[in-house]
Image (cartoon, rainbow, N blue to C red):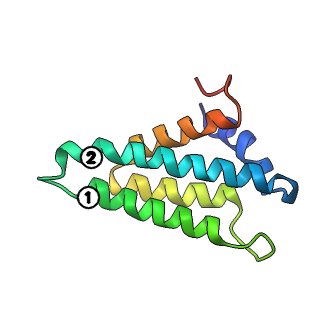
Amino acid sequence: MNRQEILDLILPLDEPSNNTRRLLWLTDLGFQLTISARAGYPAVENNMKHLIAFNEIQHQLYNFMRHPQHKERWKIEDFLEGLRQYAEASGVAGHFGAAVRSSLRRLAPSRTD
């Protein structure tokens, strides 16, 4: 799945009429992030960086979800790009990408396999 295909799925979530779908997708993304974070379990004894990175990503995700709909907030595209950049800088981009792709199945099951 390329960047444009991802954007085609998530950009409509910025519309006020899609608040419920947005929250459902963000919740699913959080769930998928916990699964991807577990990929770091075997290395925990030697390197906590993987789990620390996912902890920060999840913190940012849940903070993003907490913002009321009527207040100014990041566009979902900018938010996801910020998470991607953090994941890349932290060395967990592959596992982060897997979580994003898995979460997008909720939005378009036939396009994310």
Residue 40 marker: 2
3D distance between C-alphas at marks 1 and 2: 9 Å
How many numbered discs sit on the rendered protein?
A: 2
Q: What kind of element bears circle 1?
A: helix
Quadrant placement of the N terminus: top right
Quadrant placement of the C terminus: top right
Q: Which residue is the extreme one toward the right?
A: 17
Q: Nearer the viewer, mark 1 or mark 2?
A: 2
Residue under the point 45% across and 60% down: 57
Residue 73 marker: none
Residue 2 horizontal/vertical position (percent) = 60, 34
Q: Does residue 81 sit above or below 9 in this rendering?
A: below
Residue 109 horizontal/vertical position (percent) = 67, 27
Disc 1 and disc 2 in contact, CB within 8 angstroms: yes
Residue receiving disc 1? 49
Image quarter of residue 38:
top left
Residue 53 horizontal/vertical position (percent) = 35, 59
Image quarter of residue 66:
bottom right
Amino acid beneath label 2? Gly
Q: What kind of element bears circle 2?
A: helix
Residue under the point 66% across and 40% down: 6
Q: Which residue is the extreme one toward the left?
A: 46
Residue under the point 68% across and 67% down: 74
Q: Is residue 13 left or right of residue 81?
A: right
Amino acid beneath label 1? Lys
**Frontmost residue, 79 versus 30:** 30
Q: Is residue 53 left or right of residue 62?
A: left
Residue 45 horizontal/vertical position (percent) = 12, 53
